[in-house]
Image (cartoon, grey):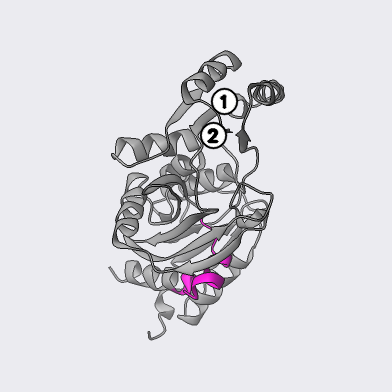
Amino acid sequence: MPPVKAFNSDVEVLYDVPRIEEKLIIRALTNLGIKPKLTTVKDTPLVFNEGAPRICIVRPMSMYRAAYSAAVREASGSFTINSSDTIINCGDKVLTLSKLASAGLRIPKSIVALTIQSAEEACKLIGLPLVDKPPIGGWGRLVSLVSDETTYRSLLEHREMMTSQQLKTHIIQEYIKTPGRDVRVIVLDNEVLGAMYRYKQENEWRSNVALGAKAVGFKPDDELREICIKAANAVKGVFVSVDVLESDGYFLNEVNGVPEFKAFIEATKRNVAADLANYIVKVLKR
């Protein structure tokens, strides 16, 4: 693709910590002749209704930093990837499940409990083993597999000591027995860029790469492609990753509004940053 230097002032990358993903995005844009504006949201105040680039790539690690950064830029007319609504709906797992269920997509049996008492009742409804997780958080943190009522009571008491109502809120789900792995798919502009298995480590039930899971790329089938595109549309996401569980078919588990893709590139050999940069050029030419 020829250089597009005319667009040099039209793209911004917002971030708090420059991870490998942000560096790859910046490099991919530069390779297309675009020199993006780089904004570190920890250091730079964001002003409402000031001139802003046409496209803002929203990459802060913190969900609230990402959502608030996107919201300020949207107020100035920027097209944000992803929007503040998408980031909030993906960053809060209760909202994610609500959007997926409203779209008629298959999710694990799930109950939301706002107190210890309702969580204990939810345990009876779901049955053991169950998965308990708060609405916010990533990399498998505070996600618990519960096999007995005594352990669950201790977990509930510990979470009740936390100051945030979100961390006191429980998403209680049936435990989906998988073949020792889960699936991550990346969707960009209604196109599936690829898929990878995440094989859990020995003595670990979670399949997060951050917890040592092994990532292996594979070719997704048509059903997986279809449900992941529908999941992206359910949260109105332009660029998202979708986490899927396998057990007698597919269960949608989570959608990520600021997707990490270092392990995905290594597993699938797909240049995700270049795909994103090419999509941005396409939008700029509209």
**Residue 42 image position (x, y, % from top left):** 66, 51
Is residue 128 left or right of 85 when viewed as pictured?
right
Please name whichever residue, 158 or 206, is drawn nearer the observer in this view of the structure.
206
At numbered mark 1, what does the secondary structure look like: helix, strand or loop? loop
Q: Which residue is mark 1?
A: 169
Q: Which residue is mark 2?
A: 135
**Residue 250 image position (x, y, % from top left):** 38, 49
Please name whichever residue, 154 or 265, is drawn nearer the observer in this view of the structure.
154
Residue interval drawn in magenta: 259-274
Q: Amino acid at mark 2?
A: Pro
The image shows residue 107, relative to residue 30, as above or below, that is above
User: Along the polypeptide, which appears first: circle 2 or circle 1?
Assistant: 2
Q: Dot 2 surroundings within 10 Å: few (below 14), some, or many (20 or more)?
A: many
Please name whichever residue, 273 or 120, is drawn nearer the observer in this view of the structure.
120
Name the residue rendered at 62%, 52% in the picture. 41
Residue 166 falls in image quadrant: top right
Name the residue rendered at 53%, 70% in the picture. 267
**Residue 95 image position (x, y, % from top left):** 43, 35
The image shows residue 148, relative to residue 228, as above or below, that is above
The image shows residue 90, relative to residue 197, as above or below, that is above
At numbered mark 2, what does the secondary structure look like: helix, strand or loop? loop
Please name whichever residue, 278 or 117, is drawn nearer the observer in this view of the structure.
117
Instruction: Find residue 3 and name its label.
Output: none
